[in-house]
Amino acid sequence: MRELLALISTEPIDQAAVDAAVAGPEHGAVVLFSGVVRNHDGGQSVSALEYQAHPDAQRFLRECCEQVSAETGLPVAAVHRVGPLVVGDLALVAAVAAPHRAEAFAACSVLVERIKAEVPIWKRQHFADGVTEWVGL
């Protein structure tokens, strides 16, 4: 049994490490979701983001990964970055491996939606005009 990768990190995310955490010779598909900081939201220009996490966020992230893995029987992994990020930075990388692509895509979608709904991480957007806004409170 491989070690489950479910991590909240202040360091840049290594996509290859997330991929490697689920990949194996028995899997013909690895779906890797990369959530990237974009330069706009709601018609406004975004210059940067700041993510803050509840002290138990990593436990919640692990539980999401464990639940999706138990429900699907597939290996999953996820890393969410916190702290200051700029446009182009990876904020979330999630991966699922499966024998076939359809089940990998479906499980990865469930994993990402569950992380967004259940892991207590909040985003503060910094707009180009100097205004900031909290999202997900």
Image (tube, helix red, strand yellow):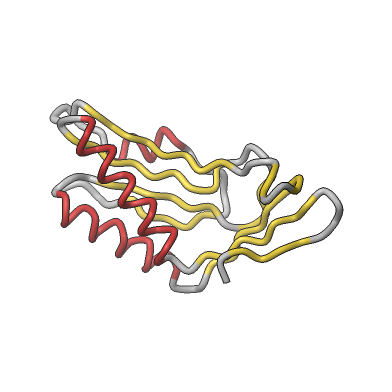
Residue 39 seen anywhere in this rendered image of the structure:
yes
Q: Position of residue 111 (x, y in %)?
A: 32, 52
User: What residue is drawn where x is 41% and y is 39%?
Assistant: 33
In the rendered view, tell whether residue 99 sits above or below residue 112. above
Q: Position of residue 5 (x, y in %)?
A: 33, 50
- Judge from the rendering whether residue 43 lies leftward or rightward of residue 96; answer left or right: right
Depth check: give the residue in front, 127 or 90. 127
User: What residue is drawn where x is 19% and y is 26%?
Assistant: 28
Q: Position of residue 55 (x, y in %)?
A: 49, 73
Q: How many marks?
A: 0
Quarter occupied by residue 12: top right
- State which quarter of the image contains the C terminus: bottom right
Residue 47 seen anywhere in this rendered image of the structure:
no
User: What residue is drawn where x is 43% and y is 50%?
Assistant: 79
Quarter occupied by residue 18: top left
User: What residue is drawn where x is 25% and y is 50%?
Assistant: 3
